[in-house]
Image: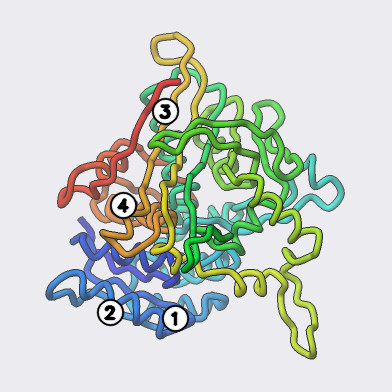
């Protein structure tokens, strides 16, 4: 096992949860929490240190994630072997490039941003999610370093499921269909249900209003209009039927690179209200990231929307329900018979709040890069270049995730035949 020194950039909801999960593990020597807001990083470290007696591995520092030079300098200062990107996708490229320049391995949970096709945005893909990162793959190989991209829950665990299905369950895959749904409800102090997204609204707008991407063998990647191909999917864990629609997501750009499948899709259970809000934001131009002048001040409309909504990191105490991330795989089983299997991970908000003080959506995202870091530390996962989770053996990951504590992370995943 190599001695790991982690630099995590971002102390928002996901970063805070990742630190709380990591403190229970012994595979690293140092864990630096860096954020533009130093006080936020310090709060995360203080909370984490209180969770384990005698804990001295965690430290808080300040960083401007928009500067690759500043990221590289912090990597060198801390002696980090691995950089974990826990901020929103706007900052992927400077953190990605800063890590490589300073000689560290890199992990993220969302990839570099897409740019729609200039002429046919709802038919042809333009600059796809992750294209900027994959363009530098040879540089990472030459440096002997690894960039493990898309290792959250979706993308991340869903991609691990794809590798597992291809290796152990199917001889031929017709479709790899990521399906995400929940029955989460957030209430105000009076008990009234309110609109409060459980994940970054900035990222949610980016995903849901960009043209969704689909992959088909013989056609490659192509796009459709937002919210296309609605279907009702029955989620396990008591969640039940939820209408899901096509959404732009990294799995569709990752899975076909390493897993043979005739079709790859991502559908998200948004619900009519959420879709209505997103459409209204788009109609009013409030989804735009281009600054506008308001009373002499330049502001981004999307940043204003994000500032007006509750911080996803703070809504856990007012949230009830479960979230489910999973992969629906159809095709031919190893026995030559038709097969339809849903591989999934259900998390209850009551459980994550009680055990970690983190709402379930950010916790479910955060646990997966920590598991991956432990596999890299142990040598169970190795590689160089820009790789997705599908490039690695799924079994060590799924075993470590589900194994009871303290040997594993005690977070079971499921499999159901449909």
Residue at the spot 60% in from the left edge and 46% down from the top edge: 270
Say which label, 4 or 1, has the lower sequence index: 1
| Residue at disc 3, secondary structure | helix
| Residue at disc 4, secondary structure | helix
In this view, the residue in front, 294 or 290, is 294
Residue at the spot 65% in from the left edge and 27% down from the top edge: 217
Residues packed near mark 4 inside 10 Å, few (<14), some (14 to 19) or many (20 plus): many
Q: What is the distance, in whole Å, between disc 1 and disc 2 at their CAs?
A: 24 Å
Q: What is the distance, in whole Å, between disc 4 and disc 1 at their CAs?
A: 26 Å
Left or right: where does residue 287 sit relative to residue 367? Answer: right
* Image x and y of residue 278, in percent: 70, 55
Mark 1 vs mark 2: in front: 2
| Residue at disc 1, secondary structure | helix
Q: What is the distance, in whole Å, between disc 3 and disc 1 at their CAs?
A: 41 Å
Mark 4 vs mark 2: in front: 2
Quadrant containing the C terminus is top left
Q: Which mark is residue 46?
A: 2
* Image x and y of residue 187, in percent: 49, 61
Left or right: where does residue 348 sit relative to residue 201? Answer: left
Say which label, 1 or 2, has the lower sequence index: 2
Say which label, 4 or 2, has the lower sequence index: 2
Pointer 3 residue: 165
Say which label, 2 or 3, has the lower sequence index: 2
* Image x and y of residue 190, in percent: 48, 66
Asked if residue 390 can be seen in this view, the reply is no
Quadrant containing the N terminus is bottom left
| Residue at disc 2, secondary structure | helix
Pointer 4 residue: 371
């Amino acid at each position: 096992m190599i001695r790991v020194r982690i630099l995590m950039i971002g102390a928002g909801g996901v970063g805070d949860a990742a630190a709380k999960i990591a403190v229970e593990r012994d595979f690293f020597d140092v864990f630096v929490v860096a954020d533009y807001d130093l006080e936020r990083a310090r709060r995360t470290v203080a909370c984490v240190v209180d969770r384990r007696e005698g804990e001295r591995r965690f430290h808080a520092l300040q960083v401007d994630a928009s500067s690759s030079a500043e990221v590289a300098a912090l990597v060198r200062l801390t002696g980090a072997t691995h950089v974990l990107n826990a901020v929103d996708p706007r900052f992927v490229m400077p953190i990605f490039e800063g890590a490589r320049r300073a000689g560290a391995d890199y992990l993220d949970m969302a990839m570099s941003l897409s740019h729609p096709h200039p002429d046919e945005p709802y038919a042809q893909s333009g600059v796809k999610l992750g294209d900027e990162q994959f363009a530098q793959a040879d540089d990472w190989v030459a440096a002997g370093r690894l960039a493990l991209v898309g290792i959250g829950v979706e993308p991340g665990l869903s991609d691990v499921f794809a590798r597992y299905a291809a290796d152990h369950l199917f001889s031929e895959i017709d479709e790899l269909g990521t399906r995400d749904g929940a029955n989460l409800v957030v209430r105000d102090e009076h008990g009234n249900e309110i609109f409060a997204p459980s994940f970054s609204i900035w990222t949610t707008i980016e995903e849901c209003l960009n043209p969704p991407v689909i992959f088909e063998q013989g056609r490659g990647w192509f796009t459709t209009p937002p919210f296309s191909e609605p279907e009702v999917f029955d989620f396990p864990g008591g969640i039940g039927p939820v209408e899901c629609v096509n959404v732009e997501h990294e799995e569709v750009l990752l899975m076909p690179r390493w897993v043979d499948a005739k079709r790859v899709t991502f559908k998200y259970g948004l619900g009519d209200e959420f879709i209505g809000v997103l459409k209204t934001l788009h109609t009013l131009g409030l989804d735009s990231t281009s600054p506008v002048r308001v009373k002499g001040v330049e502001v981004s409309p999307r940043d204003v929307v994000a500032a007006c909504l509750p911080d996803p990191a703070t809504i856990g105490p007012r949230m009830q329900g479960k979230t489910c991330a999973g992969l629906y795989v159809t095709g031919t089983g190893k026995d030559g018979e038709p097969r339809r299997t849903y591989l999934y991970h259900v998390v209850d908000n009551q459980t994550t709040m009680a055990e970690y003080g983190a709402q379930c959506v950010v916790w479910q995202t955060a646990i997966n890069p920590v598991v991956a870091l432990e596999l890299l530390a142990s040598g169970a996962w190795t590689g160089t270049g820009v790789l997705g989770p599908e490039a690695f053996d799924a079994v060590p990951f799924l075993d470590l995730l589900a194994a009871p504590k303290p040997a594993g992370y005690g977070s079971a995943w499921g499999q159901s035949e449909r």
